Image (cartoon, rainbow, N blue to C red):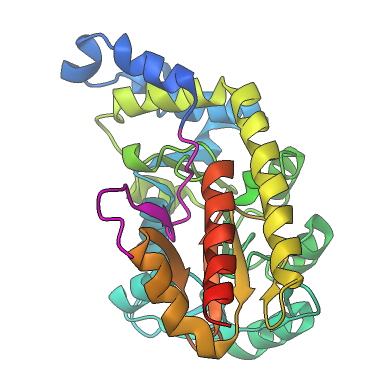
Amino acid sequence: MSTDNKAIIYLDRNENQYGPAPKCFDVLRNIDSVELYEYSRDFARGVKSRLSERLAKDFGIAEKNVMVGYGGEDILKQAVHCYIHKGDKIMIPAYSWWYYKKISDEKGGIKIEYPIVEGKDSFYYDIEGMIKVYREEKPKLVLISSPNNPTGNRLEIEQLMYVLEEMKDTVVILDEAYTLFYNKDNSHLKKLVEKYPNLIIIRTFSKYYGLAGIRIGFALMGDNHADFNMFSARYLGYNRLTELIGLAALDSADYYSEMREKMTADMDMFFNEFNAMPGFKAFKSYSNFILVEIPEQIKDGLKKYLTERNMIVKFMAEDGLFKHLRITIGTQEQNKLLMKMIKDYLKENN
């Protein structure tokens, strides 16, 4: 069966299939040419940008502790390039985004993995094991992803503060790219930034806000990152158009709250449906994707079946996750269609 005339549904990229809020499109419809031909001059008011100023206000921290970048991965890369030199150790999760290893290799860093463990219905950080690795290896920089890609697990605030207290003398990067899909409470950010001066918290507009194409990320930083601030400074300002779109997204809480509810309901649907199927195991996730272990013998056939029907999900191929799918939570229509396709495949190949 082939459906080449139908659009391909990509549920393998962790991109937000609902797209950005209507106010973001209003910005594009009403853009003034001055936003395109003039540099921003927010520095004249003593701030980096309108967006960093707004974020500082929203989170209740000083604007000097906010950094804006070309996507979250841009800030992540800059931080690693700023702090890591050849031979320096960098701690990363055992299961993690491939980009962590890539940027470490760019600087000749030595990658040290710390444990993520499979539990009954979710993966979790082995906190004591993590601290044991930290004490033994004494890394220059620690990367923590919460929620983590691809396992979907997160650190609770009490766990996070326990880890950060142990690592308070080391640069720690907390990647929170996916956190807003399940956690709308931002009250911990001010506390963490003020308590841990070596901490960098990275977020993005790419995931929750559905704005991956315009590349906006930001970091909230403790006071010990003056050199990093200089390293990443944009003296001629930032992209004025994308800043306006980012501000419009921040002004659209109701739109994104409704989207979150739909995605949370579909996450529960996937979790329950897969776990009711013999040979399948879905893991709890606090992101916009779910990790599912499938019977190994159907992997190649299922991949071919879905691909022929223009449905693309991530078939994992890394150590320890060879029998797993990572499925991006799409729209409700897309999610129902995917579930039907998988069940149809099982019926046809029983």
Up the image or down, 262 lies above or below 231; here it is: above
Q: Position of residue 104 (x, y in %)?
A: 38, 75
Q: Quadrant of the N terminus?
A: bottom left
Please give left or right for residue 295 compared with residue 239 in the image: right
Up the image or down, 15 lies above or below 348; here it is: above
Q: Residue at x 79, y 56 (%)?
A: 157
Q: Position of residue 46 (x, y in %)?
A: 43, 22
Please give left or right for residue 63 compared with residue 9 in the image: right
Residue 308 lies in the magenta stretch: no
Closest to the observer, 27 or 155: 27
Q: Residue at x 55, y 78 (%)?
A: 324
Whether residue 154 is visible? no
Q: Position of residue 110 (x, y in %)?
A: 42, 85
Residue 11 lies in the magenta stretch: yes
Which secondary structure type mostly characterizes the magenta part of the structure?
loop
Up the image or down, 83 lies above or below 295; here it is: above
Q: Quadrant of residue 307?
A: bottom left
Q: Report the residue that reaches farthest toward the left.
A: 37
Residues shaded magenta: 1-19
Q: Residue at x 25, y 55 (%)?
A: 4
Please give left or right for residue 272 compared with residue 230 in the image: right
Up the image or down, 237 lies above or below 82; here it is: above
Whether residue 336 is visible? yes
Closest to the observer, 215 or 129: 215
Q: Residue at x 63, y 27 (%)?
A: 58
Closest to the observer, 46 or 54: 54
Q: Quadrant of the C terminus?
A: bottom right
Q: Position of residue 28 (x, y in %)?
A: 31, 18
